Amino acid sequence: DQLLIEGYLETRVGDGTYVVESLSVPGRRAASQTPRPPATTELLSLRGRRIAGTGASSSVQDGAFMPGIPDTEHFPFTTWRRLLSKYVRREQSHL
């Protein structure tokens, strides 16, 4: 979707998606292209708009369900270390 919006791809109904033949100058659209409305957060809920406005993570590292902050309390670190150690020791001839 992003490549379509940026003008790198074009779609042909019933035929597929293709890389455009030539790219236009950034900021200018070819006459044949229909401008798309800019993406907005208006379709998001109030909470979604608040999260979108805060960036990738919160400066306050407290509480559950913090955007961008993983829950490490229940991560299986012991299992992860065991599996990582097991597979790192194997010969990796295919790499």
Image (cartoon, rainbow, N blue to C red):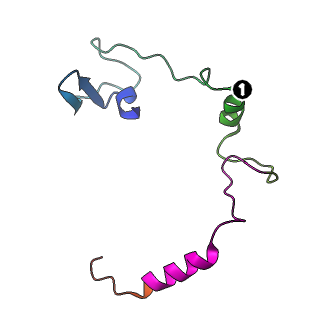
Looking at the image, which residue is at 17% across and 26% down?
15
The residue indicated by pointer 1 is: 46
Q: Residue furthest left?
A: 15
Toward which corner of the image does residue 31 lie, by quadrant? top left
Residue 26 lies, with reference to residue 94, above or below; the image says: above
Dividing the image into 4 quarters, which one contains the C terminus? bottom left
Query: Which amino acid is tagged 1?
Result: Leu
Looking at the image, which residue is at 52% across and 23% down?
39
Is residue 2 in sight in this rendering? Answer: yes
Is residue 21 in sight in this rendering? Answer: no
Q: Indicate the position of residue 72 as horizontal and vertical percent values.
A: 69, 64
Image side of residue 8 versus residue 27, left or right: left
Q: Indicate the position of residue 45 as horizontal and vertical percent values.
A: 67, 26
Q: Indicate the position of residue 11 as horizontal and vertical percent values.
A: 26, 25
10 Å crowding of disc 1: few (<14), some (14-19), many (20+) = few
Looking at the image, which residue is at 71% across and 26% down?
46
At mark 1, the secondary structure is helix
Q: Indicate the position of residue 61 as horizontal and vertical percent values.
A: 79, 54
Image side of residue 33 versus residue 69, left or right: left
Q: Is residue 79 or residue 15 the one in the foreground?
A: 79
Image side of residue 90 versus residue 74, left or right: left
Looking at the image, which residue is at 67% across and 32% down?
48
Toward which corner of the image does residue 5 lie, by quadrant? top left
Dividing the image into 4 quarters, which one contains the N terminus? top left
Residue 45 lies, with reference to residue 36, above or below; the image says: below
The magenta segment: 64-87
Toward which corner of the image does residue 16 lie, by quadrant? top left
Residue 70: in magenta span: yes
Q: Is residue 95 or residue 90 the one in the foreground?
A: 90
